[in-house]
Image: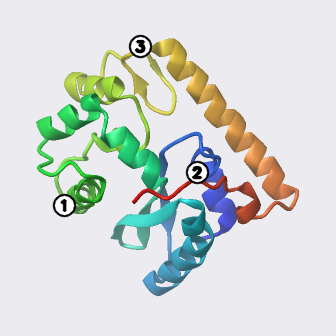
Amino acid sequence: MSVDYVIRHAAPTLAGIKTGNLFPCTFSSLQDMVQDLRAINRVLVPRGLRLLPLRCRAGRALLYLFRPAALSRDLSRDAARQLLQQVGYESLDQPACLRELTRRLRADSTFPHEIGLFLGYPPEDVKGFITHQGKHCKCVGCWKVYGDEVAAQQRFAAYRSCTDNYCRRRAGGASLEGLTVTTRLAH
């Protein structure tokens, strides 16, 4: 897995304007993928980010790049807490929620749509998606919008602009370190 791939799929999180990004990655060797993740995390962790494999199957991994401090903030909001409780999360602290999400992703059951909360999506949109089973949304961008369409469109544009900017800067020689905005680590 290349640094370019991570930048292309997670620029808004690297820039500090999004809580997390989820993206697939193929690998020929699990050992090589783990080594790649360790190398990337050596750069990201001191800057307040983590890159984790949430699921690995048949040469494919589902990777989650996130800012733990932002995730803790997002999951502590009343609307997010209520939704997590409604879908069966027993403990609502960030590490326990992340463990439960990972368990759900690894189980061969339905996809855990509450994952939007872990990506920084508005809770009303995550709840709307679950309630309406993905139908009857106001618009579609990075996610399906059931709440504030104007705010969502602005965020979608910001994420696209950020990704374009980061890809240009990377093509111009910028390093992962240079493209990663540092934040305080959550304790």
Res 107 label: 1
The three-letter amino acid code for the residue at tag 1 is Ala
Q: Quadrant of residue 78?
A: top left
Res 138 label: 3
The 10 Å Cα crowd at callout 3, few under 14, some 14 to 19, many 20 or more, is few
Q: Looking at the image, is mark 2 or mark 1 nearer the viewer?
A: 2
The quarter in which the C terminus is drawn is bottom left
- Residue that extends furthest to the bottom in the rendered view of this protein: 31
The three-letter amino acid code for the residue at tag 2 is Ala
Residue 28 in view here: no
User: Label 2 vs label 1: CA separation?
Assistant: 25 Å
Residue displayed at 88% across by 56% down: 172
Q: Is residue 64 above or below residue 72?
A: below
Q: Quadrant of residue 134?
A: top left
Residue displayed at 74% across by 48% down: 166
Residue 7 coordinates in the image, percent (x, y): 66, 56
Residue displayed at 54% across by 59% down: 48
| Residue at disc 2, secondary structure | helix
Res 10 label: 2
Left or right of 8, for residue 61: left
- Does label 3 or label 1 sit earlier along the sequence? 1
User: Label 3 vs label 1: CA separation?
Assistant: 31 Å
| Residue at disc 3, secondary structure | loop
| Residue at disc 1, secondary structure | loop
Left or right of 49, for residue 102: left
The three-letter amino acid code for the residue at tag 3 is Lys
Residue 27 coordinates in the image, percent (x, y): 50, 74
